[in-house]
Amino acid sequence: MVSPYEEYVLALRDNRAMQKYVKKHYLDADLSSAVERYGESQEFHSIREILQPWIPRRGRLLDIGVGRGLTSLAFRKTGLSVVGLEYDGSQISGVGALAEYLRETSVPLDVLQGDGLHLPFRDGSFDAIFCRSVLHHLPDLDAGLREISRVLKPGGGFLAWNEHICTVFSSKRRFLASHPAVQYGVNEIAYSIPQYWYKFRQANFTDIRLIGHYLDFTQFNAQLRETPFRAKIGAAPIVSRALHHIHRVRRSIIVDECDLPVTCIVGKKRLRRVMAN
């Protein structure tokens, strides 16, 4: 039986008008080509740069929700010790497809089929944990984050890449109506930026940063100086800082859900457990 996500991927591949979209999102049938492109992408470069402080020379990375292995294979090609976990056994988009690829290539990669809400690992097993477009598919985000925190070493880093976001207090109707996978029955969820931050904090993460939705100060200041009028307004450091703060608050509360916006969240596991209120 074909799963909703498999049906969605197959429909995209069969649609000539969607081939650029398929390539852009690394959904093409040729996994070797997709892994090669992804390993050279700016996205993967940014991911490695963010995770690097948490991965020592002999460190271990857990990649959750690997699908057919795109990210795990890219990490493995850098020489990193990677353990992949995927719930879906699909031959199109899950560990079935990855298992076939590994048999053909003999790439040494440790991959398990399992549930992200019940991770089959001991406490503190990994130096860093990564997932790509996974959190917004979990049926219970709080439980998933608690499990991630449990198997992560104290002080270890967790990076969630490309997670759907919505406006604060949104009904999510516009988001669901705009997402092409929903019509195939794929479970798509979105959370607001404050919700992500709070849920990460409750799961014992600190130094929480949200990347890629609102601009950081350097990017914002560069845009502010693109025209003489705006440059004059933001010339005083205290003014430019205040304007950047307003920008962050506004973009954290209100987003255009029709554009299916995403953010990336990174946090560090606290060295000591902080009891939730």
Image: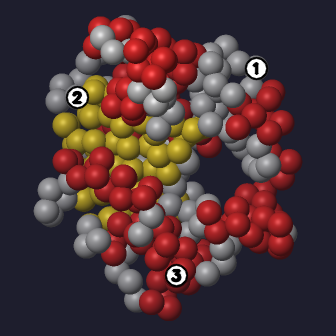
Residue that sits furthest to the bottom in the current view: 104
Is mark 3 in CB contact (under 8 Å) with mark 2? no
Q: How many marks?
A: 3
Residue at mark 2: 270
Left or right: 252, with 92 as reference point: left
**From what the image shows, is residue 39 above or below residue 190?**
below
Is mark 3 in CB contact (under 8 Å) with mark 1? no
Say which residue appears at 51% left-offset and 33% top-offset. Answer: 213
**For residue 188, which numbered disc appears in the image?**
none
Say which residue appears at 61% left-offset and 61% top-offset. Answer: 25
Say which residue appears at 73% left-offset and 58% top-offset. Answer: 5
**For residue 32, which numbered disc appears in the image?**
3
Q: Amino acid at mark 1?
A: Ser
Estimate how packed mark 2 is, as few (under 14), some (14 to 19) or many (20 or more) residues with alpha carbons within 10 Å.
some
Tag 3 secondary structure:
helix
Q: Amino acid at mark 2?
A: Arg
